[in-house]
Structure formats: C-alpha cells, structure tokens
Amino acid sequence: MSDVEDDDLGLAEEETQEEAGGEEGEAAEQEEAENENLDEDLGDEEEKELGEEEEQKEEEQKVPEKPLTDETVAESLSLLCKTGDGLAHAYVRLDVHEKELTNVSILKSFIHLRYVDVSKNNLKDISSLSALTHMLTLKADYNMLSCVKLEEMPFLQVASFNFNKINSLEGVSHPMLEHLCLNNNEITEITGLDEAKLAHLHTLELRGNKLKTTGGVHLPNLKNLFMAANTIDKIDDLDSLQSLTTFHLRDNQLEDLDGFTDKLKLLQYINLRGNNVTSVKEQAPKMACLPMLRALVLFENPAHEEDEYRLEVLIALRKLERLDKDEYSEEERNEAEEIYEQRLKDDAEREASGEDQQNED
C-alpha cells in the first residue's frame, strides 16, 4: 500500500471516529439533558414537598397562643352531679371544642370533671388532663397531638384522638378503657399496647393511618378492630385476638388472605372491600379455619368480577350467611353443597387412581 493510500485511510478513520464521537457526544448530551430534566422534576417535587412542610410548620408557628381561661371554663361547664365522695356537688361535663385553644393546663384544678371535649383546637399537649382522675370520656379530635401519652387514668372508658398527628401508641395504659379511636393519624406500626393495662378494651379504631401489617395487636378481649384505609398488604400476628368478632380491612392493599387462624374462634364479620384479591377459588379457602364466620365483604376486588363468584365463596365457606350485601338463598346453598361433595368425590377418585398407578409401577 502506498503512503498516499495510507494517508487517505488514516484520514478516513479519523473522520469516522470524529463522526462516531460526535454521535456519542450528542447521545451523551441528550442523556445528560434528560437526566437534568429528571433531576429538575424530582427537585421540583422535593422542593414542593419541603415547601408544603415548611408552609405547614409556618402555619403552626403562626397559631397565636390562646390558653383556656376561667371565664371560658365557667361558660362551658354543665351536668351538675354529686362528687365522688358523695359529700358535695360539682359540674362534671366540659365542652370547649372549636375555641382555637393552645393550652388547657388550667383544667388541672377541675378534678371532678368526667366528660371532657377539647376537639377542634390547636393543642399539642394534653398531659395536664392526667390530673382529672375521675374522667370517663375524653374527646380530643382535630388537634396537633403527636402522642397520646397520659398518666394512667383509673376510670377512663372512651378516648378519641382522631385527626391528629399521632405516630406512637406508647402511654395508652388505662385499665377501664373500652373504646379507643385513633383514626386518621400517622401511625406506622402498632407497639406499646399492653394487654395487662388494657384488659377492658373492646374496640380499637385505626382507620386512615400508615400501617403495612395487622401485627402488633395482642389484646385477647378485643372484639372490634377497624384498620380500613391503610396500606396493609399482609395479615399476620392475629393469634391472640381470641374474642374478635368484627374485623374491618377495607381499602388496603391485600392480594392474598394468608394469616387467618382458627384462634379467631369468634370472628363473625370481615370487610375486605377495595383490596386486590384476585381469585376467590384460591383465597376464600384460607378463611375456612374461621368457625363462626357468617358475613364477608369482597366487593371492589378483582375477584368480584369472576364467574361463579358467589358460588365459589360459598363452596369454600359453607357456613357463610351473607356475601357483600346479599344473603345466600337456599338454592345457592344446596348448589354449593352439591358441588363441594362432587369435588371431594373427584379428589378421592384421583387419589385412588394415583395409588393404583404407583402399585402397578
């Protein structure tokens, strides 16, 4: 090959490399631009979230101090009753809801109060209410509480803390408490509920929180458990709920129904509406261990659109009386029983046939 040809070939290679390099450079620039746009988008989202958080904090900081006064208390008292020792009379009901209050520490001296409503205020701390040892009912919905920690209140029976910012259940230890409402808070896990200190609790409401699992509720006397509108994708840790009769899990992210146990011997009603259950033929038998189950809601699950949906559920759960809003008819019950018996017979024949085949081999 001549020197001229070598020069021409080298020049061509350089031009090719430059073109390739140019294309790679353009691709890299394009990718970098896309990444920058993505980073900008993510940055915008993060800035937006941070902005919202800052705005919320600013709003909280802007809340003017407004302590509860003797004058407001006097206007809000009602229900004259005998005091605990029976030697005098005192007003036992206080309703100061929607007063824009930020401090209720004055209530420490009103020791005879039994029914207290401090809802729809701007309270971040209600620890002063621990002094009200005769209190039976407490409503503290729609405030700014981050915890529910109060000293043990010997007679408290009903406590409601809906629509706060509560993220911990530590400190709930009231021996006579029967009904606890914690709907629409920021609870991510259930810890701190001591069965020994909550022996009378029969209803626990945890709707609209950030729970991922049903675990953590170890209350043998609990009868009603409401966990709708969380992000629960797993049913587990239910063995201790031996008195449970009603279980609400609507609007969660359940795909399978593993986790039910025969320890739930009194469970009668389960609401699973608005989850992601896809096959009743596969999932419904997982509830056959529940001897008292009589009503089941599976509406707004993918499985609801399956052929023979109602029939397949009844074949698996033959004691069921109602599915969704409709009770089973006698005709449906008879048909389900016939199919169930036939499937048992078919399974027995297949098993016998398999054993015969093994013997021949």
Image (tube, rainbow, N blue to C red):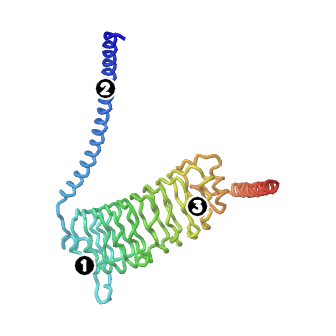
What distance separates the C-alpha of mark 1 from that of mark 3? 46 Å
Residue 251 drawn at (x, y percent)? 47, 54
What distance separates the C-alpha of mark 2 from that of mark 3? 64 Å
Instruction: Please give the label number shown on residue 110.
Output: 1
Residue 71 drawn at (x, y percent)? 18, 72
Q: Which residue is mark 2?
A: 26
At 60% from the left and 52% from the top, the residue drawn is 280
Label 2 Cα neighbours within 10 Å, binned few <14 / some 14-19 / many ≥20: few
- Nearer mark to the viewer, of 1 and 3: 3
At 40% from the left and 72% from the top, the residue drawn is 193
Measured along the vertical axis of the image, is residue 278 above or below residue 75?
Answer: above
Q: Which residue is mark 3?
A: 295
At 28% from the left and 36% from the top, the residue drawn is 36
Measured along the vertical axis of the image, is residue 77 above or below residue 54?
Answer: below
Asked which quadrant contains residue 45, the reply is top left
SS of the residue under disc 1: loop
- Nearer mark to the viewer, of 2 and 3: 2
Given the image, on which type of amino acid does mark 3 rest?
Ala
Pick the quarter of the image with the N terminus: top left
Look at the numbered discs 1 and 3 and tell me whether their residues touch, using CB distance below 8 Å. Answer: no
Given the image, on which type of amino acid does mark 2 rest?
Glu
What distance separates the C-alpha of mark 1 from that of mark 2? 76 Å
